Amino acid sequence: MPCIRSRDDDLEYLKSRLPGFSGYEDEASRHIADGQVRAFAGETLARLREQIAATLSLVDSERLDALVLRCGFLDRRYIAALAHADLDAIGLACLAEHDRAIVESVAPIADGDATDLPAVIDRLNELFDSRRVPPAGIITGRFS
């Protein structure tokens, strides 16, 4: 999908949901931002898991556990690509938009609404999978 929102809007949203959000201006801040986004998602899902463990189906329980685990580990290819990328304004906007989509996908759970957990799991896996797109997807301002 092409990046369509203002990077400033996405950064403000991320800062509102992730206190101390680092931004993307250099390699170190992009690495920290990745960890902040994954931590927000993973910690939110882990808290939910504790709250509703007894009510989850085996399939949903396993899918949730796998996603929590996925949030706990960085994708080395993604981080390496970002570390060496010379991101232009469009690439930075796309990165912010993509991270916002991750945070927005888990935000209802953080706010106490877990009514559509299977869809949230699907969406988050889709978003994390799209990070495996070659870094040109970021540099040109497109994520699949």
Image (spheres, rainbow, N blue to C red):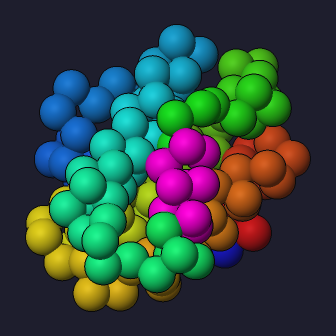
Nearest the viewer among 75 and 94 is 75
Q: Residue at x 70, y 20 (%)?
A: 83
- In reply to whether residue 104 is colored magenta, the answer given is no
Q: Is residue 17 visible?
A: yes
- Prevalent SS, magenta region: helix
Q: Is residue 60 above or below residue 89?
A: below
* Residue at position x 60%, y 45% in the image: 70
In the image, is 19 to the left or to the right of 62? left
Q: Could one spot residue 7 in this view of the protein?
A: no
**In this rendering, is residue 124 above or below 58?**
above
Where residue 28 appears, x then y in whole percent?
Answer: 52, 12
> In the displayed structure, would residue 31 be above or below residue 42?
above
Q: Residue at x 60, y 32 (%)?
A: 73
Q: Horizontal placement of 30 versus 16: left or right?
A: right
Kindly give the residue lying farthest to the front in the view shown: 54
Q: In which quadrant of the rendered view does residue 3 lie? A: bottom right
**How many numbered marks are there?**
0
Residue drawn at 75 percent across, 27 percent down: 76
Q: Which residue, as the protein is rendered here, is positioned at the far top?
A: 28
Q: What are the residue bounds of the magenta stretch?
A: 62-70
Give whichever of 114, 25 is nearer the camera. Answer: 114
Q: Is residue 65 left or right of residue 43?
A: right
Q: Is residue 36 above or below residue 65?
A: above
Q: Quadrant of the C terminus?
A: bottom right
For residue 69, what is the image quadrant? Answer: top right
Q: Position of residue 96 (x, y in %)?
A: 46, 48
Q: Position of residue 124 (x, y in %)?
A: 53, 65
Q: Viewer-proximal residue, 119 or 143?
A: 119
On-image quarter of the N terminus? bottom right
